[in-house]
Amino acid sequence: MFKCKAAWNKLAPLARASSTLCRQAGKRAVLRHERTPQFVQPAHMSSGPSGGGGENTLYFVLVGATCLAGGAYAYSTLVGDRERYQQRITEIESRSSKPAAEPSTPAKTQPETAEPLPAAVAEIVPETPPVTQSASEPASAAASPAVEPTHAPYLLIGGGTASFAAARSIRARDPGARVLIVTEEDDLPYMRPPLSKELWFSDDPTVTETLRFKQWNGKERSIYFQPPSFYVSPTELESVENGGVAVLTGRKVMHMDVRGNKVKLSDGTEISYDKCLIATGGIPRNLQVIERAGDEVMKRTTLFRKIEDFKALEKVSRELKSITIIGGGFLGSELACALGRRSADLGLEVVQMFPEKGNMGKVLPEYLSNWTTDKVKKEGVKVLTEAVVKNVTYKEGKVEIKLKDGRVVKTDHVVAAVGLEPSVELAKSAGLEIDSDFGGFRVNAELQARSNIWVAGDAACFYDIKLGRRRVEHHDHAVVSGRLAGENMTGARKPYWHQSMFWSDLGPDVGYEAIGIVDSSLPTVGVFAKATAKDTPKAATEQSGTGIRSESETEAVAGSVAVGKAAPTPPPQQKEDYGKGVIFYLRDKVVVGIVLWNVFNRMPIARKIIKDGEEHADLNEVAKLFNIHEE
């Protein structure tokens, strides 16, 4: 009975419409010809032409086809209605059978206490209140099998700082946004700088499990930006009322279909998107001589980048007798100082080797690089300068490193800290352009690679209106570029003009902040002064209240930069102790980079100087803007 009534409800309007059309056509014919239309063709003589009833035949064929089509449509509609009805009933029954509360954490166990964030991130991330959790309540994801969403309005590829900053920026501008972060790591978004800095100076023997550390200012915090309770489960992202941010861990985006607006994950899952951010970061480089050395050497080599790398190296430092670090840049020098400081207590031999003449020789001028090398040696590290690795082998339980000048180093473990390669594997499938000089995805001023695809962080090669095309691999850049990309994904259309900064600490007593192009091959002018007790990273963080010296203040904070005309300053004197100072990097007599050596919280002034792009007759006067001579 239900089917017949439904069929009549579908066919009745068609029948009425057909009858109405016939009546209207008849009336029009009467008005035109003043006679009743003949729907049946008059009979013809047998000698007349045949086929006179063709018009009536066509009419009946059309009417019959219409009826058949209407019946087919009604049948398909009824079937579809019945299927949707059954699906709705099943969904209602499944909802009523669910427990009242379920854990919604998408990733493995993480700390449950929200922490203060870096200044740059804090601008876009409101502080989350602490979340208490009973001992019996698991912090990991629910035991039920996760069902990934098939569509994400905002898809963020990569789970690092840039993705997290973008997610919070999107939610700030679009409170109901549904954001999905896909990361091949098993962890929720976290900050990387403490992996080579503060975590190594923790007194907590369980630091590899808690991943909590004391900042130089003594305050304790977690490495994670937010606890698991901040995120929604990927299984609930499409249905949660007010949207949210979900993290799909342990999955890698293998293929990107730009025309179809979808991606394919490592497990075969396909997810479509409206707008997408690529923040894939980078992959640690390795030496070819190590890669060719075989499995035994590779098993004893760490490419330091992730939480797992920190945990593995920390364990190695306690179990083995010697570690050799190859690389004299930021990461290599930080790890050397961190391991060197604990070497005496652990009976650990720490060796650092690099091809330059001193630590951070590609960044600092030679005299300051040499001073830094002495500082690293005082931390208990054996430093081998101008060391070019020729061959690496595994013999008698040791990794044997032969240098080109004939020196040989035998060690238990190797850490290769020789740079970062931008992760651009998606470029081929997505058809995105890669910069041939700097690497990374080429983007426009708004960080766009395509109309609905943005790139941020280490993988973005952007155009700097003051310094030309660049690619930056530092925390502050990841924060600012991620935030800007998130704003532009919600329609802001803002250009990237920010001069990001970076910093490095050689323990709690020596640190520096830098901005712009800091290349030791450029001409430099250094202005130094005597340091005081407050001129250390520890004192700086005590004053600022944060251990992550990353900020995104505008140059307006610095005010105007006005200095008097004076004679050019002579080169810096060769001092044995460079307490604090400012190093200017010049290109065509214009400052393009600045290093603040044990000078903190003055970055807006440096940013203003670079943005102005003016030629200064006396940089000694410019250095006074940083108050380096005050006690």
Image (cartoon, rainbow, N blue to C red):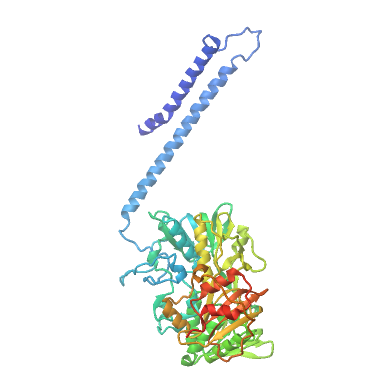
Position of 555 relative to 316 (above/below) = above
- Residue reaching furthest to the right: 405
Residue 383 picture location, percent across and down: 59, 89
Q: Is residue 413 visible?
A: no
- Residue reaching furthest to the front: 565
The quarter of the picture where the N terminus appears is top left
Quarter of image, res 608: bottom right
Residue 17 picture location, percent across and down: 46, 24
Left or right, residue 566 beside residue 21: right
Left or right, residue 500 beside residue 6: right
Residue 127 picture location, percent across and down: 38, 67
Q: Is residue 278 visible?
A: yes
Front residue of 267 and 148: 148
Position of 263 relative to 461 (above/below) = above
Q: Which residue: 51% across, 10% down? A: 36
Quarter of image, res 398: bottom right
Front residue of 611 and 298: 611
